[in-house]
Structure formats: structure tokens, C-alpha cells
Image (cartoon, helix red, strand yellow):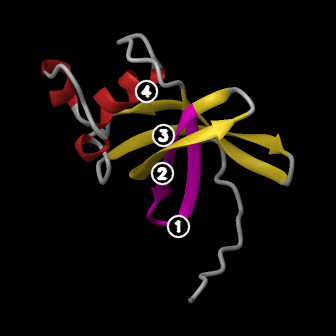
């Protein structure tokens, strides 16, 4: 096995272009949640965001998925295949985590083309 070593340094607060690498259901202290793993390609920074499993159109999971793939609006269901690999802008801030400063997703926005 080969392990890549990344020295983590959070991005400054602002909006950056990211690609969604994966969505995975995770058990958290708040119950089961979706973990969205985004990567900023220029600096190689990964940022994780968590959403509920709610299927409501008001829920962040749906809102984030719709930003990544507007065609979801015309569908009855969506899956990770509909959004993984897609790009967006993330507005991030720096917060203090248990292991030091880290980025937190404030908002998921469409790319300005």
C-alpha cells in the first residue's frame, strides 16, 4: 500500500472552485449523515461537508445536489452518480477544529462560467 502524505493548511476564507469526489453515509454523534468530500484542485485541499439524509427540497443535501447538477430538479430521485465528479464554488470559512484550524463549508454555489 502507498500512502500519500498531505500537509493540511486550510484555505483562506472565500469562494473556491471544487470538485465533488465522493458522497458517503457516515455515523456521527448527530446520527447518520451524508459526508460530501470536495477537492480544490489548484492547491489540493480537501474539504468535507455534512448534510442530513432528509429527502426534502428544503434540505441541504438536495440544495447542494441541485447546484452540482440542475437536471436533478426534473427528477423524482437522484443518486451520487448524478453529482460526483461535478464542479461548484464553495464559500468556506476557517473554524477551530479539534486538531487545529480547518475549513467549513458556508455555501455551495454554481460555477460562474
Residue at the spot x=59%, y=31% of the render?
32
Separation of residues labelled 4 and 3 (CA atoms): 14 Å
Residue 50 location (% of width, % of height) = 57, 35
Residue 80 location (% of width, % of height) = 31, 43
Label 4: element kind: helix
Separation of residues labelled 2 and 4 (CA atoms): 14 Å
Q: On residue 38, which mark appears? A: 2
Sequence-wise, the earlier of marks 4 and 3 is: 4
Position above or below: 80 against 110: below
Separation of residues labelled 1 and 4 (CA atoms): 24 Å
Quadrant for residue 76, please give it.
top left
- Mark 3 near mark 1, Cβ–Cβ under 8 Å? no
Q: On residue 61, which mark appears? A: 4
Label 1: element kind: loop
- Mark 3 near mark 2, Cβ–Cβ under 8 Å? yes
Residue at the spot x=80%, y=50% of the render?
101
Amino acid at each position: 500500500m502507498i500512502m500519500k502524505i498531505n500537509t493540511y493548511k486550510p484555505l483562506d476564507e472565500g469562494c473556491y472552485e471544487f470538485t465533488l469526489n465522493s458522497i458517503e453515509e457516515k455515523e456521527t454523534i448527530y446520527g447518520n449523515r451524508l459526508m460530501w468530500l470536495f477537492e480544490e484542485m489548484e492547491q489540493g485541499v480537501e474539504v468535507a461537508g455534512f448534510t442530513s439524509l432528509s429527502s426534502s427540497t428544503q434540505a441541504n443535501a438536495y440544495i447542494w445536489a441541485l447546484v452540482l447538477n440542475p437536471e436533478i430538479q426534473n427528477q423524482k430521485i437522484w443518486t451520487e452518480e448524478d453529482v460526483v465528479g461535478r464542479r461548484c464554488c464553495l464559500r468556506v470559512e476557517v473554524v477551530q477544529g479539534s486538531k487545529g484550524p480547518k475549513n467549513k463549508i458556508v455555501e455551495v454555489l454554481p460555477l460562474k462560467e
